[in-house]
Image: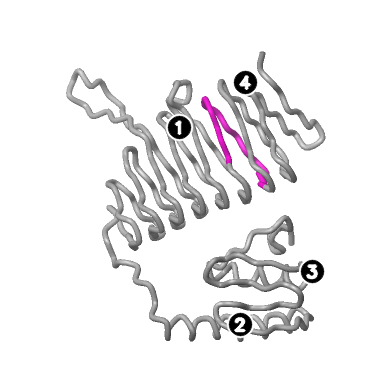
Amino acid sequence: MAQEHIDRDNRIYIKANRITIGRSVTFGKSIDVRLKGDFSIGDRSHLGDDVEVRGNNVSIGCDLFHSRGLRVGGGGRLHPRANLSIGDRCTIHDNFINVCEEVRLGNDVGLSPKVAILTHGYWLSVLDGFPARFAPVTVHDGAIVGYRALVMMGTTIGVRTVVGAQSVVTRDLEPDSIYAGNPAKLIRRIVTPSQEEKLALFEHIVTEYKSVASYHGLSPDIETSYPFIRVNGCRFNAVTLVFDGTEDAETDDFRDYVRKWGLRFYSERPFKSVWQ
């Protein structure tokens, strides 16, 4: 027998063969999930307002941030391979994800607003020579897909690859590269900065944060020794993105700021700007 999770006050209805909701998960309003298979969402994830999900199995990892307006399903959603898996620490928005075939998002993947992913295309009869294609889509760890981009069926986006705004992905994209255009073409490879460049960037980020903290009315105690940044009672490693120590409102502010530079330190405490 199917399981249900219902919150009438917030218009939340989740129905699936099995439902697993992790610790400290938060939901917005107007969420409608109806699956033939299983639904799971990991610790500290947030699923925002105005969500409709259809298909077979949906698996969402830990620390997801979703703003609002998600649609999962579309044509072919009544199919045994109509599965969606989302890894840990992903960010998604008002996206359309078609699951006629499986869609897999790795860890640390970002889908910018208005991104669409398609796994099928057809119209008139194939017996009359018209095209039809049904194939899965994979977006590997660390990739970011830009505003209003379209990812077509049967494509794979490589590890840490950047897809520019309004691009159309029609073929596999190699890792550690920047693509843009319709169809998406290679712009350049991503090259690791030199040690000198890293140090300059590190100092720039810290200097900029000090002025932002002042603007926020904060005066945290900050010390640096690359790659470490100590903010009050916390020490952050800018290379490994690991930190230790005692968190407070000022370390929350710091984590929230450096996130804009891709330094994402995850904690049991949510990112500050998510809720403001």
Q: Which badge, 4 or 1, is on the more N-terminal residue?
A: 4
Give the image location of residue 5, x and y in percent. 73, 28
Magenta-colored segment: predominant secondary structure:
strand
Residue at 63% across, 50% down: 63
Left or right: 127 with respect to 99? left
Disc 1 residue crowd, few under 14, some 14–19, many 20+, Cα 10 Å: many
> Can residue 105 be seen by looking at this rendering?
yes
Q: Which residue is mark 2?
A: 206
Report, in whole angstroms, how far the alpha carbon at label 1 lies from the one at label 2. 43 Å
The residue sitting at 68% across, 45% down in the picture is 43
**Residue 137 position by quadrant:** top left
239 inside magenta stretch: no
Mark 4 to mark 3: distance in Å?
40 Å
Relative to 118, is 196 above or below? below
The outermost residue toward the left is 129
Q: What is the number of the mark on residue 186?
A: none
Identify the element where label 4 is drawn. loop
- What's under tag 4, amino acid-wise? Asn
Which residue carries the number 1 mark?
99
Query: What is the secondary structure assignment of the residue under circle 3?
Result: loop
The image shows residue 91 at horizontal and vertical percentages of 56, 52
Q: Earlier in the sequence, mark 4 or mark 3?
A: 4
Disc ID at residue 17: 4
On screen, residue 136 versus residue 51, left or right, reads left
